[in-house]
Structure formats: C-alpha cells, structure tokens
Image: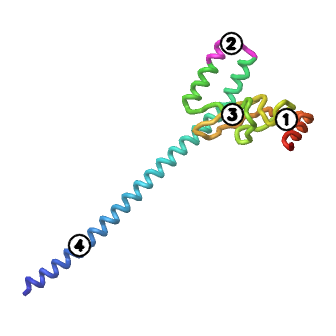
C-alpha cells in the first residue's frame, strides 16, 4: 500500500516536473528569441551609425572636391586632373554619386535655387553652381542651381494654349 502511495506521489511529482520543464523551455525559447531580436536591432543600429558617420565625413570632403573642380576650370594641369579623377573614384567606391541636375526639372529636394533667369523653358535647371551628392539613396548635400523662368510673353502664350 505504501508503494502504491509512493507511486502516486512519484507520478504526480513527475507530472509537475514535466510541466515545470515545459515552462522553463518556453521561457528559454522566448529569451532566445528576444536575444536574437536584440542582436538584429543592435546590428542595424551599428550599420545606421556607420552610414551616418560616413556621410558626415564625406560631407566635409565635398567642399574640397568643389575647389578642385573649380581649379580645373581655370587651370589645365594634368596633375590636378589626376587628383580630381582619383578623388571622384574614391567617392564612387564609397557609394557616393553626383545627382544629375543640369537640364532637369527643378526639384526642391535635391537643390536650392540661387538665381532665376529668363529662358525658353519654365522651371528647368540651366546652370549648376554647386553639385549635389547622394549616397545610399540619401542626399548628402543639395546642389545650388540657376533655374529658368519663361519670358512673360511666352508665359502668356502658354497660358492661352492651355486654356483653349
């Protein structure tokens, strides 16, 4: 009789231990999932921080590139051209590219207007005074541009065409 009682107690203890093991297993799996999520989040934050620092550092070098480009306009020195090409290639290797502005419709997100001149087309970039650069789909620095505005007489003719 004592054996049967012990057997019932043992069976009950075993069941309780199985339940406890299952609870610990579930807690472990949740903790493991939380850790993996944290690890992914930390890696993403590190990557974002690395990109942000990279963009800031590159942003400090862009005025130097502007100066080299302006010097090239006035001086046809092969050494200066070599430095400019090397600098441009380094920027490309880092994922930086020039945003094409000349001849495009003016986009306030990629450039700021420095001057408005009369022209044959409305709202077109006619001159780039400072290049715009982007990296990883993000604008690092907006350009500075001249934008055309239709002559007053051409504007009234265009309005007449559109109203007819």
Camera-nearest label, 2 or 1: 1
Mark 3–mark 2 CB contact (< 8 Å): no
Rendered location of residue 127, percent (x, y): 78, 28
Looking at the image, is mark 3 or mark 2 nearer the viewer?
A: 3
Q: Position of residue 63 (x, y in %)?
A: 69, 30
Q: Nearer the N terminus, badge 3 or badge 1?
A: 3
Q: Residues within 10 Å of mark 3 (few under 14, many from 20)?
A: many
Mark 3 vs mark 4, CA separation in Å: 67 Å
Q: How many marks?
A: 4
Q: Report whether 111 appears left or right of 163.
A: left
Spatial separation of the CA atoms under disc 3 and disc 1: 21 Å
Residue identified by numbered label 1: 149
What residue range appears in magenta?
Answer: 74-82
Which badge, 2 or 1, comes first in the chain's sequence?
2
Look at the numbered disc 4 and give the secondary structure of its residue: helix
Circle 3 sits in a helix, a strand or a loop, which is it? Answer: strand
Up the image or down, 127 lies above or below 35; here it is above
The stretch drawn in magenta includes residue 77: yes
Q: Which residue is mark 2?
A: 77
Determine crowd level at label 4: few under 14, some 14-19, many 20+ residues with C-alpha closer than 10 A: few
Instruction: Please identify the dominant SS of the magenta region.
Output: helix
Residue that protrudes farthest toward the front in the picture: 164
In the drawing, what numbered circle is on residue 140?
none
Find residue 16 and report its image quarter: bottom left
Give how far apart the Cα atoms at labels 2 and 1 are: 37 Å
Give the mark nearer the N terminus: 2 vs 4: 4
Residue 132 numbered mark, or none: 3
- Image side of residue 75 versus residue 164, left or right: left
Residue 27 lies, with reference to residue 157, above or below; the image says below
Q: Which residue is mark 4?
A: 17
Q: Position of residue 102 (x, y in %)?
A: 73, 29
């Amino acid at each position: 009789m004592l054996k049967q009682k012990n057997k019932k107690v043992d069976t009950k203890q075993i069941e309780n231990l199985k339940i406890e093991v299952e609870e610990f297993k579930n807690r472990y799996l949740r903790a493991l999932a939380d850790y993996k999520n944290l690890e992914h989040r930390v890696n993403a934050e590190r990557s974002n921080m690395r990109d942000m620092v990279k963009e800031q550092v590159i942003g400090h070098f862009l005025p130097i590139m502007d100066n080299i480009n302006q010097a090239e306009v006035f001086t046809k020195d092969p050494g200066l051209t070599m430095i400019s090409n090397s600098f441009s290639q380094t920027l490309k290797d880092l994922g930086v590219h020039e945003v094409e502005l000349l001849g495009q419709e003016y986009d306030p997100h990629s450039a700021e207007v420095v001057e408005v001149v009369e022209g044959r087309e409305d709202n077109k970039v006619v001159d780039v005074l400072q290049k715009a650069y982007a990296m990883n789909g993000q604008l690092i620095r907006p350009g500075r541009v001249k934008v055309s505005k239709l002559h007053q007489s051409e504007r009234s003719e265009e309005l007449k065409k559109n109203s007819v």
